[in-house]
Amino acid sequence: MKRRIFLMIGICLAVACAPALALADGKDRDRDERHHRADEVYRLRQKGALKPLADIREQVLEQFPGRILETEFEKKDGLAIYEFYILQGDGNVREVKVDARSGRILTAEID
């Protein structure tokens, strides 16, 4: 009888903990991917293949004043792209994509 109770408790704990373990694994993968991208940006910047983020950030804020909420880096179709999410004075969030190599603004749209 006691074995059955302990077995049931063990099964309940396993079922209850499974989603949390799966979520933790997903967070680890996201963190690993972010670190990989950060390493890639660092290597490209050291080679001089990318413009300094500070310079691009300044340029973006000159054209689109506001508060930068988030900055992302991605490679898409061979382009290295910085994405800026800017909270503007009117309350809108603007997504601005910039070529990280040239500093050219690719798109700027309200999110």
Image (cartoon, rainbow, N blue to C red):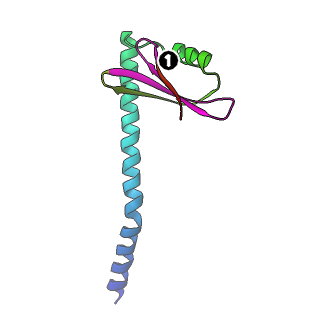
User: Which residue is found at the position 39% from the left and 74% from the top?
Assistant: 12
The quadrant in which the N terminus is found is: bottom left
- The answer to whether residue 107 is above or below residue 27 is above
For label 1, the crowd category at 10 Å Cα-Cα, with few meaning under 14, some 14 to 19 and many 20 or more, is some
Q: Position of residue 30 (x, y in %)?
A: 39, 41
Q: Which residues are magenta?
A: 79-105
Residue holding disc 1: 53
Side of 102 where 62 appears, left or right: right
Query: Helix, strand or loop at disc 1?
Result: helix
Residue at image x 69%, y 29%?
Answer: 89
* Front-lying residue, 67 or 9: 67
The x and y percentages for residue 24 are 40, 51
Residue closer to the observer: 3 or 82 = 82
88 displayed left or right of 19: right
Circle count = 1
Task: Give the x, y percent position of residue 42.
Answer: 40, 20
